[in-house]
Image: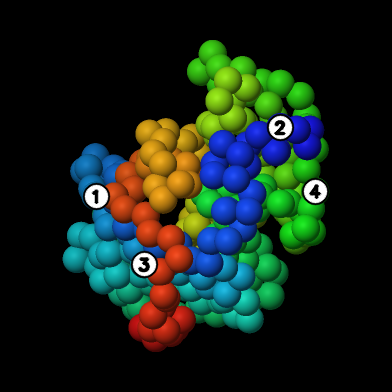
């Protein structure tokens, strides 16, 4: 199994290069459909290795922006006031601190070692990997690898046997929401799904950016909901403004 991981690391830029990434900033567009209306929402994701994960989501349909903020010591989620939809009552804005379990469950997002950080040098991070066997995805042969994070949660990776690209990751239960990066916000809006949740994310349109292989499109299936994230730009090793650590409304 380690030979698979080694080839994966080499494909994505090499273990040492990936470990040297100190920060990551991404501008993206989230595409989804609500009540039959196609929407595009701007996302801004900022990471500082081992210190910060933040995702800001622009407002839609009369709503303000929201964000998820995770640091090495605490985490918060903010949702704006929501107008009434289809007979539902309008709600006030809210800023909610994560519980210790919720924080631990999201801190893997602070890993900046490329697009699949927890799998890079996994053992040194306290993670455990297991090759479950082979699986096909869209007629492509894949290695099926289960990665158990030091938090106890696990992620499954399907890695192409042809080129060692990660084609899909998946998770169940609480980790399903965490994998999307929107778990805290979904919970505040009553859409967390809990232990019954399932998520799979397929990765497409790979590009090499500053020597790092990166998928520029994600197709997220969360239960019956499917959304697409189209990444517009990625920057590595740029200074992170301290404003991204602020948990103000």
- Residue at horizontal 61 percent and vertical 70 percent from the top: 50
Marks 3/2: CA distance?
35 Å
* Comes first in the chain, label 3 or label 1: 1
Marks 2 and 1, how far apart at CA: 37 Å
Label 3 packing within 10 angstroms: few (<14), some (14-19), many (20+): some
Q: Is residue 184 above or below residue 222?
A: below
Residue 231 image offset from top left, x and y in percent:
34, 48
Answer with left or right where residue 1 lies relative to residue 89. right
Q: CA distance from mark 3 to mark 1?
A: 14 Å
Of the residues tagged 4 and 2, which is closer to the observer? 2
Contact (CB < 8 A) between labels 4 and 2? no
Say which quarter of the image contains residue 92. bottom left
Image location (x, y in percent) of residue 234 = 37, 55
Q: Which quarter shows the C terminus?
A: bottom left
Q: Which residue is mark 3?
A: 56
Query: Alpha-carbon neighbours of circle 2 within 10 Å: few (<14), some, or many (≥20)?
Result: some
Q: Secondary structure at mark 4?
A: strand
Label 4: which residue? 128
What residue do we see at 41% from left, 36% from top? 206
Check contact, mark 3 vs mark 1: CB within 8 A. Answer: no
Which mark sits nearer the N-terminus, 2 or 1?
2
As measured in the structure, the alpha-carbon distance from the residue carrying label 4 to the one carrying label 3 is 31 Å
**Callout 3 secondary element:** strand
Marks 1 and 4, how far apart in space?
Answer: 37 Å
Mark positioned earlier in the residue sequence (4 or 2): 2
Q: Residue at coordinates 66% horizontally, 34% vertically from top-left?
A: 7
Q: Which residue is mark 1?
A: 40
Determine which residue is flagged by label 2: 4
């Amino acid at each position: 199994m380690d030979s698979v991981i080694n080839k994966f690391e080499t494909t994505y830029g090499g273990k040492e290069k990936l470990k040297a990434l100190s920060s990551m900033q991404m501008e993206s567009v989230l595409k989804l459909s609500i009540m039959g209306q196609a929407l595009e929402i701007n996302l801004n994701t900022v990471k500082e290795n081992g210190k910060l994960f933040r995702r800001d989501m622009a407002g839609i349909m009369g709503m303000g922006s929201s964000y998820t903020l995770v640091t090495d010591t605490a985490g918060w989620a903010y949702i704006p006031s929501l107008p009434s939809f289809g007979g539902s009552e309008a709600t006030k804005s809210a800023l909610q601190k994560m519980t210790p379990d919720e924080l631990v469950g999201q801190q893997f997002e602070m890993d900046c070692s490329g697009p699949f950080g927890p799998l890079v040098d996994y053992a040194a991070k306290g993670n455990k990997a297991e090759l479950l066997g082979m699986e096909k995805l869209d007629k492509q042969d894949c290695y099926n690898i289960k990665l158990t994070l030091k938090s106890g949660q696990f992620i499954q990776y399907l890695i192409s046997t042809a080129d060692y690209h990660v084609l899909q990751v998946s998770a169940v239960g609480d980790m399903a929401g965490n994998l999307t990066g929107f778990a805290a916000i979904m919970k505040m809006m009553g859409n967390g799904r809990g232990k019954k949740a399932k998520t799979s994310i397929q990765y497409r349109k790979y590009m090499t950016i500053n020597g790092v292989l990166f998928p520029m499109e994600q197709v997220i299936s969360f239960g019956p909901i499917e959304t697409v994230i189209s990444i517009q730009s990625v920057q590595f090793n740029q200074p992170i403004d301290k404003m991204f650590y602020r948990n103000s409304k």
